[in-house]
Amino acid sequence: MKRLLIIFTFLHVFIVAIVAQNADYKKAVAHYKNIKNVTAVATKTSHKNAVTKDVVTKGTLVMNAPSEVSITMDGGKDQLLMQGNVFTMTVKGKKHTTNSQKNTQFATFQTVFESIMSGGTIDISKLSDLTISKQGNNLVLTITPKTSSKKEARRMMFSSFVLTLDSKSGELRTLRMNERAGYTEYSFSSHRLK
């Protein structure tokens, strides 16, 4: 009986935490409900485990409702672009394109960004590969794509995506894309919402 009570207490605390985090998320992104366009200054940090010095570049973030996100660096030579379910990554002028139907690691990424731009009207609480935690004044959304095999995991470009939102203003603070041999992190400042 005592064991059952401990399990019940743990589940209760876990469920209350999930509900609170989802409420924090909805409150933070409610700012976007009537916003059609967001721009910000972007700083990109490319970190490779085998290299001692990170590469840092500047650019811009543009988010257009309902489902367009563009992070452009180095005059367009480097770009991360989401247009609905189509993802285009341009690295040193070379384009790589995929979509969230063929490449499932981007499906939750797409849903989360669409939810942010909709002001939280798109429910993300049932996404099994998403966790939300609160760290100080920030909400941290971690997307860890599910894989069915080790072979599929090795083929994935990113092992996880981590988005940080300011819990009061809803502003996107960082986007980190973790890779096997390092990470790419974008930090955002000077947000303008229209």
Image (cartoon, rainbow, N blue to C red):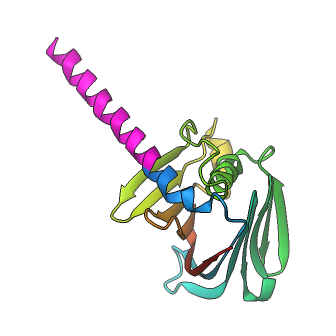
User: Where on the picture, by quarter, is residue 43?
Assistant: bottom right
What are the residue bounds of the magenta stretch? 1-23
Q: Main secondary structure of the magenta part?
A: helix
Q: In this view, does 42 lie above or below 135?
A: below
Which residue occupies the extreme front position in the image? Answer: 34
Give the residue displayed 80% in from the left and 43% down from the top.
101
Q: Can you say which quadrant of the picture contains the C terminus?
A: bottom right
Q: Is 86 displayed left or right of 185 in the figure? A: right
Q: Nearer the viewer, residue 130 or 51?
A: 130
> At which x and y percent is residue 170?
51, 64
Kindly indicate the quadrant of the structure image that contains residue 63: bottom right
Residue 43: within the magenta? no
**In terms of depth relative to the viewer, which is nearer, 108 or 28?**
28
Task: Work out whether residue 91 or residue 166 is closer to the camera in this orientation and state it.
Answer: 166
Counting the numbered discs, the total is 0
Asked if residue 67 lies left or right of residue 168, the reply is right
- Percent x, y for residue 151? 67, 43
Is 4 in the magenta?
yes
The residue positioned 61% from the left and 54% from the top of the image is: 119
Can you say whether 72 is above or below 112 in the image? below
In x, y percent, where is residue 161?
57, 58
Residue at the image position 84 percent from the left and 75 percent from the top: 94
Residue 152 lies in what quarter of the image? Answer: top right
Residue 113 visible in the picture: yes
Which one is in front, 193 or 13? 193
Residue drawn at x 61%, y 56% is: 116
| Left-right relation of 47 to 192 | left
Q: Residue furthest top?
A: 1
Q: Percent position (x, y) of residue 180? A: 57, 61
